[in-house]
Image (cartoon, rainbow, N blue to C red):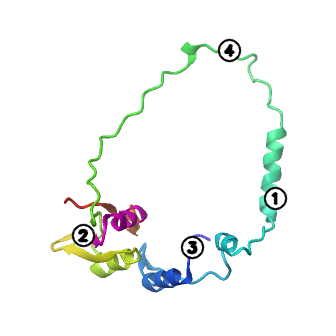
Amino acid sequence: MRGQAFVIFKDIGAATNALRSMQGFPFYDKPMRIQYAKVDSDAIAKVKGTFTEKKKKVKEIKKDKKKEQRKEAPLPPPAYGAPAPFTPSAMPAVQPPIQAAPVLEQPPNQILFLTGLPEETNEMMLSMLFNQFPGFKEVRLVPGRHDIAFVEFESEIQSSAARNALQGFKLTPTHGMKISFAKK
């Protein structure tokens, strides 16, 4: 199952649109190969009312038995006699957590600002990635800068949905995309 993912859509039209738009899209420098699942997922089967509980595999049954045995086993006696009585001074001092500097977040905007893009990024690549979201309008690259771009949506709500879904998306193994709202 390594290198595989299962994505569930509410209707076949949305699944078909995603399949067509993302087929062959470069992901970790390899083209994605997308196909429909052979059987309905549990979530879809529950919605359709055709869900049936599947039998556990032998490995899962063995793991469950081992967990039960560990729970029932008595704890061994202390190795060096009786434990020392608890005193608050015996506890190590707890350091308060270090707070990160606050990140100034731009207010929601229908235009997204992308940073951390790899050198091979192009308009078509970003369009294929963002056009799966409702309200997508266009991608604008910045001449002379390969690492940044702007993506415009029809509304702030639609741009927020795309931002939340694709935040940190890795276009290559070393380039995670950072998405923020553009300055107004």
Query: Looking at the image, which residue is at 80% across and 29% down?
Result: 76
In this orientation, which residue lies closer to the viewer: 176 or 150?
150
Q: Which mark is residue 84?
A: 4
Please tell me whether the stretch drawn in magenta is mainly helix, strand or loop.
Answer: helix
Of the image marks 2 and 1, the number of the one nearer the N terminus: 1
Front disc: 3 or 1? 3
Helix, strand or loop under label 1? helix
Of the image marks 4 and 3, the number of the one nearer the N terminus: 3
Q: Are marks 2 and 1 in contact (CB under 8 Å)?
A: no
Relative to residue 136, is residue 85 drawn left or right? right
Identity of the amino acid at label 3?
Answer: Ile
Identity of the amino acid at label 4?
Answer: Ala
Residue where numbered disc 2 is placed: 149
Identity of the amino acid at label 2?
Answer: Ala
Q: Which percent across, then down, holds residue 15?
A: 52, 81
In this orientation, which residue lies closer to the viewer: 23 or 13?
13
User: Which quarter of the picture shows residue 3?
Assistant: bottom right
**Distance from label 2 to label 1 (Cα)?**
51 Å
Residue where numbered disc 3 is placed: 8
Residue where numbered disc 1 is placed: 61
